[in-house]
Amino acid sequence: ESALALPFLSRGYFNSTNCLRESRDAVLKKKPLVLVHEHDSSRGGAPLAKFKSDCPEDLKPVFFDKERPICPWFTKPEYQLMSMVMISEALLLASPKYSSCEDLKCYLPYAATTLAHVVHKNV
């Protein structure tokens, strides 16, 4: 049995019977949730506000709690490692071993850890 749930918010997530069943089961079992947000509409994403409006009322307080981190999913190679680091940190913090920690500083060697490291000066 899983220790936590990792919903990947993409187009149609809240219209999927299977996704909603799994989400409600995780909530019922009080499993930690680590949300990953696809924002790129060409890849099935949408603005977070759209996901909030599509979310069933019974799941809104759980999915969109102000304290819950939402990990953005970046597909460009320069940013994708940053997404993986954020997801890894959230997964670890949701796990029993690290649940008492407030913060973790995970990193991958040579991975950008902030947007400032990958934005070109001429932009």
Image (tube, rainbow, N blue to C red):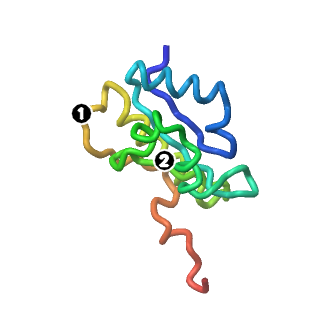
Whether the residues at callouts 1 and 2 have beta carbons within 8 Å, the answer is no
Q: Is residue 71 left or right of residue 95?
A: right
Residue at the spot of label 2: 85
- Residue 73: image x %, image y %? 59, 51
Kindly report which numbered mark, 1 or 2, lies closer to the viewer in this rendering.
Answer: 1
- Callout 1 amino acid: Ser
> Residue at 69% across / 41% down in the picture?
12
Q: On residue 100, which mark appears?
A: 1
- Callout 2 amino acid: Val
Res 30 → quadrant: top left
Q: How many marks?
A: 2
**Residue 31 vs residue 89, the one in the foreground:** 31
> Residue at 52% across / 49% down in the picture?
52
* Residue sitting farthest toward the top: 1
Q: Is residue 34 above or below residue 80?
A: above
Of helix, strand and loop, which one carries label 1? loop
Of helix, strand and loop, which one carries label 2? helix
> Residue at 60% across / 86% down in the picture?
122
> Residue at 29% across / 32% down in the picture?
99
- Residue 57: image x %, image y %? 48, 38
Q: Which comes sooner in the sequence, label 1 or label 2?
A: 2
Q: Is residue 75 left or right of residue 51?
A: right
- Residue 118: image x %, image y %? 55, 69
Res 60 → quadrant: top left
Dot 1: few (<14), some (14–19), or many (≥20) neighbours within 10 Å? few
Q: Is residue 59 above or below residue 3?
A: below
Quarter of the figure with the C terminus: bottom right
